[in-house]
Image (tube, helix red, strand yellow):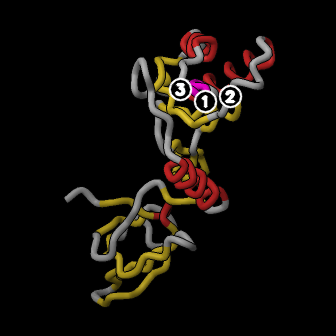
Amino acid sequence: MPKQWFILHALSGHELKVQRNIASRVQQEEMEDIIGEVLIPTEKVSEVRQGKKTTVNRKFFPGYVLINICLYDEGNTFNERAWYFIQNTPSVIGFLGGERPAPLSEDEVNSIVHQIEEKKETVAPKVIFEPGETVKITDGPFLNFSGMIEEVDPERGKLKISVSIFGRSAPVELEYWQIERTAE
């Protein structure tokens, strides 16, 4: 039977639990020929917690898991064993699409896999900044100064900010985590 990609709706925050449950149950119930890979598309994101820069994994689609499974055979007949296997997996709400879910197209799968590969190596900032925004500096020698963003360099995670010092505008280069948006 051909395996196709489907989307499972999982309890939010339980995506890894679903992935582990499926992996262990596939081996126990000898379903390797019916169920393949389980993917949780994520990207690395940098953020500041308690004054320290940390990197965390953020899910592209919180509450959803991709699964490569033989849900239909060549004659488009429903595979009840696979269906009940997934429905009886803890933390799984069901297939996206209800009683007769449609598989993802090859283009959709390739797009998601490309996104995963593209973002695997880079660490994106949790907050995206735009030129012209007013921000407050939260770290470094210009602590508590306000300034306006002149340039954004997402590859390096740096910003060029124009800060007013002694009545004169001076450019300062800072990392994303060293600033925060001002409440306007």
> Which residue position is annotated with label 1?
74
Q: Residues within 10 Å of mark 1 (few under 14, many from 20)?
A: few
Of the two numbered discs 2 and 1 in the rendering, the one whose residue sits closer to the viewer = 1
> Which residue position is annotated with label 2?
1
Q: Which of these two is toward me, 100 or 44?
A: 100
Whether residues under marks 1 and 3 lie with C-beta atoms below 8 angstroms apart, the answer is yes
Q: Which of these two is toward me, 27 or 60?
A: 27
> Which residue position is annotated with label 3?
76
**Residue shown at the point (47%, 17%) measured from the top left:** 93
- Magenta span dominant secondary structure: loop
Q: Is residue 90 visible?
A: no
Whether residues under marks 2 and 1 lie with C-beta atoms below 8 angstroms apart, the answer is yes
The question of residue 176 being in magenta is answered with no
Q: Position of residue 73 (x, y in %)?
A: 61, 26
Which of the numbered marks, if any, corresponds to residue 38?
none
Q: CA distance from mark 1 to mark 3?
A: 5 Å
User: Which quarter of the image is occupied by the N terminus?
Assistant: top right
Q: Which residues are magenta?
A: 71-75
Mark 2: secondary structure: loop
Residue farthest toward the front in the current orientation of the protein? 75
Mark 3: secondary structure: loop
Whether residues under marks 3 and 2 lie with C-beta atoms below 8 angstroms apart, the answer is no
Relative to 113, residue 38 above or below: above
Q: Which of these two is toward me, 80 or 47?
A: 80
Q: Residues within 10 Å of mark 2 (few under 14, many from 20)?
A: few
